[in-house]
Structures are given as structure tokens and as C-alpha cells.
Image: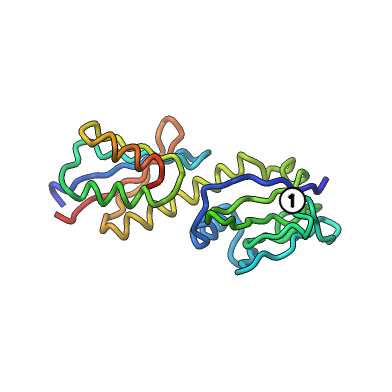
Amino acid sequence: MAGAKVIKIDVDDSTGEFAVDLTGYQGQGCDAIIEAFGEIGAIQTHVHKPEYSATATKQIKQGA
Amino acid sequence: MSAYSTNTTQFKDCKLLLAALAELGFTSDMVEVHETGKQLFDYHGRATHYTDEAGDKAHVIIRRQFVGGAANDIGFRKGSDGHYEALLSAYDRSCGYNEAWLGKLTAAYARTAIMQKAQKQGLRFAGTVKLANGKTQLRFLDVRG
């Protein structure tokens, strides 16, 4: 388990809005994770990964 | 009053909606699921026509006996865009089945959807933490290498 990456997702229990924290996350798997959680729908979603492209962040916010 | 009004929701997946309803106390034996919309009824058992002259219909229905004493049916109608809209009566809104309740339902839907998506991604659930800001943090381990 050593070295396993941790993904934290904060859910607002009164609205369902959630934020996916991928800070420090590396690798191509990032795309798949963003795509997967973006599929949940138009529930407002935020991605915390400063180095990730603005386009991808916009897509997940729109529930792409 | 039993007048119905609608709220748009973010719900697209019926199974996730049912899971969210169960988390809020409406287990599967209390919820009807229909391929085509079925009529909603008020507290007198009368068919209602507030949002549709042909009758208020819904695809996912909690009948009034499971909602409360003088309650009306609660419905979720699937729209052409794939999203469900909630049909809630004015009376039931005053009894707590309002926007705040829909918010909690949305949160339950989101948590269930996140768990499902994470599992499909091969992420390992590592527990929940209640944060100081009141939010619930779901933690996953990516052990895929």
C-alpha cells in the first residue's frame, strides 16, 4: 500500500456539490478519474489540481 | 394545499435515485418505478392536474401513505433531457419535503454515484471523514500502480 495515491472528495451534504482533490496526483489515470466523476452529471464539481489544464476543469464542471 | 410544483434536479440514473431515496428512509418497498409516467394523487386520493392538464404523472413515485399523515404523492418525472424533475405539493413542502430535502437527496445521490464511479475506476475506498466545515470527505486509494 506504500506509495498509493490518495484521492479525497469533499461532498456538501446539503447540496450534493462535491470537489475532487487530485493535488499531487500524477499520471494519465488522472484523465480517466476526471472523466468518471464528470459523468455523474451536472452536480457542481470542482477539481483541485492546479497543474491540470483549464479545459479539463471546465469540462468536469459542466458534467462532461 | 396539494398544488404541485416542480423542481429540476441533477438526477439522471434511476438506480442512484432509488439508492438516495433509501438513504433518506424511503426503501424500495415504498417506491414505485414505472417505464411510463403514472398518475399522482392528493391526500383525498384524487388525481391531480396541476402541472399537466392530462394529469400529474411521474416515473418514480412515493405514495402518500409513506410520506406522512395528510401528505400527497411525491413524484419524479423523467424529462426528455434525461433528467428527473421532482413534483412536490405545497403541503408537503411545508412539511419538510422542500428544496432543503432535495439538497440532501442530491448529496445522497452524489455520494452513491461517487462510490460507484470510484469502484469502476479500481479505486479502493479508504473511509469517510466528517470535516469541520460540515462536509463529508470520501477517501480513496489508487493502488493501480
Residue B75 image offset from top left, x and y in percent: 67, 56
Residue A35 image offset from top left, x and y in percent: 31, 50
The residue positioned 75% from the left and 60% from the top of the image is B40
Total count of labels: 1
Left or right, B83 with reference to B130: right
The residue positioned 71% from the left and 60% from the top of the image is B57
Residue B126 image offset from top left, x and y in percent: 30, 50
Q: Nearer the viewer, residue B1 or B55?
A: B55
Q: Amino acid at mark 1?
A: Thr
Residue B94 location, quadrant: top right
Residue A33 image offset from top left, x and y in percent: 28, 49
Graded by Cα atoms within 10 Å as few (under 14), some (14 to 19) or many (20 or more), the crowding at tag 1 reads some
Q: Nearer the viewer, residue A43 or B131?
A: A43
Q: Nearer the viewer, residue B82 or A43?
A: B82
What residue does disc 1 label?
B51
Q: Nearer the viewer, residue B7 or B94?
A: B7
Residue B33 location, quadrant: bottom right
Q: How is the image coloured?
A: rainbow
- B111 over B59 or under it: above or below: above
Left or right, A14 with reference to B75: left
The residue positioned 40% from the left and 35% from the top of the image is B131
Q: Give the SS element for disc 1.
A: loop
Left or right, A32 with reference to B10: left
Provide the chain ID for the residue under circle 1: B
- A56 over B66 or under it: above or below: above
